[in-house]
Amino acid sequence: MPAYSLTPFQQLSAQFRGSIVHRWAKDEDRSAAEAARTLTEHARGLNIISRELAVPGAALSEWNKRRQPPLWAALAAFDLTLKRGWRPESNEEWAGFASLILKLSPGVNLDRLSESLPADIDLNIASGWIAAAIEEDQHYRVRKKMAVKPE
C-alpha cells in the first residue's frame, strides 16, 4: 500500500493546530507555569482531560517551540482564543477552526453546530469549512479501516 500523505485540508488544519497554543499563550500576561495551569484547568472544564495536575510550564514552552501541542491543549487554547473574540481569516485559520470546532462537538451535525457558533462568525464561510472538516473526518475513518494491519 502506498505511503499515506496529508490532504491539503489536513496540512492547513495541522499548521493551525501547531500554532494555536502559541497564539493563545503569547497574549497571556503570565508565566509559562501559570498559563499551563490555566490551560489545564480549562481543558478539565471542557471535559477533554481528567488529569489533576497541571502540565509544567516547561511543557507548554516546548509545545510552542516545536509547534506540536497535544490535542487537548490545542482544543483548550482554541476555545479560550475564540472566547477572547478571535475569528479566522486565512485558509489555514478556517481549516483549523473547522477541524477543532468539530472535535469540540463530536457527533453534532452541521446544522446544530452552525447554531452554536459565535454570533459574529460568517455562517456561509464557516459552514463550508465545517462541511469540509466533516468530509475529511469521514474519509480519514474509511482510510483507517482500510489500512493493512500487520499479522
Image (cartoon, grey):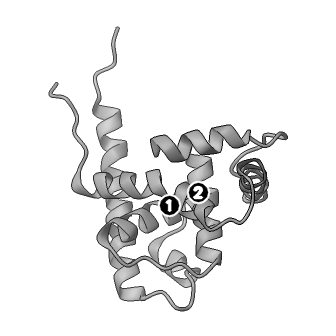
**SS label for mark 1:** helix
Determine the residue positioned at 31% across, 58% down: 12
The extreme top residue here reads 151
Comparing 44 with 17, the one in front is 17
**SS label for mark 2:** helix
Determine the residue positioned at 64% across, 38% down: 59
Name the spot of residue 149 as percent of width and height, x first.
33, 19
The extreme right residue here reads 52
Q: Is residue 69 visible?
A: no
In the picture, measured across the screen, residue 145 lies left or right of residue 1, that is: right
Determine the residue positioned at 64% across, 58% down: 76
Residue 82, above or below 20: below
Residue 3, above or below 125: above
- Amino acid type, callout 2: Leu
Separation of disc 2 and disc 1 at Cα? Answer: 6 Å
- Amino acid type, callout 1: Leu
Name the spot of residue 43 as percent of width and height, x first.
71, 54
Residue 44, above or below 93: above
Name the spot of residue 30 as percent of width and height, x first.
75, 60
Q: Quadrant of the N terminus?
A: top left
> Which residue is tagged 2?
75
Discs 2, 1 touching: Cβ within 8 Å? yes
Residue 100 — which label? 1
Determine the residue positioned at 38% across, 62% down: 134
Chain-order first, disc 2 or disc 1: 2
- Report crowding for label 2: few under 14, some 14 to 19, many 20 or more residues within 10 A (C-alpha): many
Residue 71, above or below 23: above
Q: Quadrant of the C terminus?
A: top left
